[in-house]
Amino acid sequence: MKSNRICLLSMRRSILDHLKSGLPTDCIAKELMTAISERYRVSSNADIGSLLQVLFNMNYDGNGGVRDYVIRMVDYQTKLKALKVDLPDTCIVHQALCHTRPYGCDYHVTRFLSETST
């Protein structure tokens, strides 16, 4: 119980006074942590929105490799899958082809995607 009191003391000292008002006073350290996590839960919708915005506003500028561009797109798709937003692979292929077409990179994109699918 001494360790619990020490944890509570250090936790309460690290929290600003105006934030302590709604937190329970008589509890153990684990209950205080759950109360804090429920009170200040971060919405994943903001993360989803920003990832989708970055993904669909990506433009290939002709500098660097097409492979790196497609890998960055797939990386954002993987981050969205972790947040339970499933984008089909055809959506990523469509984005990659539309944004690399002005640079004549259609062949490179389709070749890279066919290599990764096997």
Image (spheres, rainbow, N blue to C red):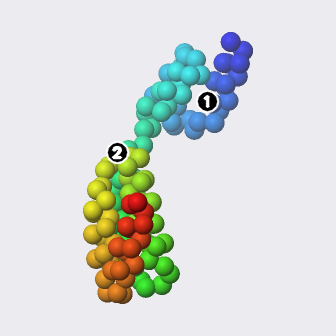
Which residue is nearer to you in this view: 8 or 92? Answer: 92
The residue wearing badge 1 is: 12
Helix, strand or loop status at disc 1:
helix
Which residue is nearer to you in this view: 11 or 117? Answer: 117
Percent coordinates x, y for residue 42 in the rendering:
42, 43
Label 1 Cα crowd, 10 Å radius (few <14 / some 14-19 / many 20+): some
Res 21 seen here: no
Q: Residue furthest top?
A: 1
Q: Residue furthest front?
A: 118
Circle 1: residue type: Arg
Percent coordinates x, y for residue 103 in the rendering:
36, 87
The residue wearing badge 2 is: 84
Q: For this view, does 24 lie left or right of residue 60?
A: right
Quarter in which the N terminus is drawn? top right
Res 55 seen here: yes
Q: Residue at x 45, y 38 (%)?
A: 40
Q: Is residue 118 above or below residue 85?
A: below
Question: From the viewer's perspective, is the residue at label 2 or at label 1 nearer?
Answer: 2
Quarter of the image where one finds residue 99: bottom left
Quarter in which the C terminus is drawn? bottom left
Helix, strand or loop status at disc 2:
loop
Q: For this view, does 33 lie left or right of residue 73?
A: right
Q: Is residue 57 above or below residue 80?
A: below
Q: Residue at x 63, y 30 (%)?
A: 11
Circle 2: residue type: Lys
Q: Residue at x 46, y 73 (%)?
A: 67
Q: Residue at x 45, y 60 (%)?
A: 75
Q: Is residue 107 above or below residue 74?
A: below
Percent coordinates x, y for residue 41 in the rendering:
42, 38
